[in-house]
Image: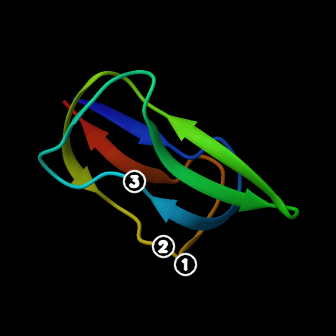
Amino acid sequence: MAELQSPLGGKVVEVNVKEGQMVTEDDELFIIEAMKMENAVYGDAGVVKEVCVKEGDQVEEGDKLAVIE
């Protein structure tokens, strides 16, 4: 299992995955807004086991966003 961590602090504006979904390395899993810029977050290929944040949540760098197996 791989833990997907936030690469920066900011506000989660989009959650593009749900638990049980198959994802690839090219999928935008989350969009985080920091300093009025939107940043896409990508993860490893696999199956999403857990989504740990929702739209509107504030995250810090290193916070767990999801678990991908």
Which residue appears farthest toward the bottom when viewing the image? Answer: 56
Q: Are marks 1 and 2 in contact (CB under 8 Å)?
A: yes
Task: Decide which of tag 3 and tag 1 comes sooner along the chain.
Answer: 3
Q: Is residue 52 above or below residue 2?
A: below
- Locate residue 44 relative to residue 63 in the image: left or right: left
Q: Residue at x 45, y 23 (%)?
A: 26
CA distance separating discs 1 and 2: 4 Å
Q: Which mark is residue 16?
A: 3
The C terminus sits in image quarter: top left
Q: Nearer the viewer, residue 4 or 20?
A: 20
Which residue appears farthest toward the left when viewing the image? Answer: 20
Q: Quadrant of residue 36 in the image?
A: bottom right
Q: Which is more foreground, mark 3 or mark 1?
A: 3
Which residue is identified by label 2? 55
Please, what secondary structure does the residue beneath circle 1 have?
loop
Q: Quadrant of residue 49 in the image?
A: top left
Q: Which mark is residue 13?
A: none
Task: Decide which of tag 2 and tag 3 comes sooner along the chain.
Answer: 3
Amino acid residing under circle 3: Asn
- Locate residue 54 relative to residue 47 in the image: left or right: right
Q: Residue at x 58, y 67 (%)?
A: 13
Q: Quadrant of residue 18 in the image?
A: bottom left
Please, what secondary structure does the residue beneath circle 2 have?
loop
> Residue 37, image x and y in percent?
83, 55
- Locate residue 33 relative to residue 51 in the image: left or right: right
> Residue 15, image x and y in percent?
43, 60
Q: Residue at x 41, y 65 (%)?
A: 53
Q: Residue at x 30, y 21 (%)?
A: 45
Which residue is identified by label 1? 56
Please, what secondary structure does the residue beneath circle 3 have?
loop
Amino acid residing under circle 1: Gly
Q: Which is more foreground, mark 2 or mark 3?
A: 3
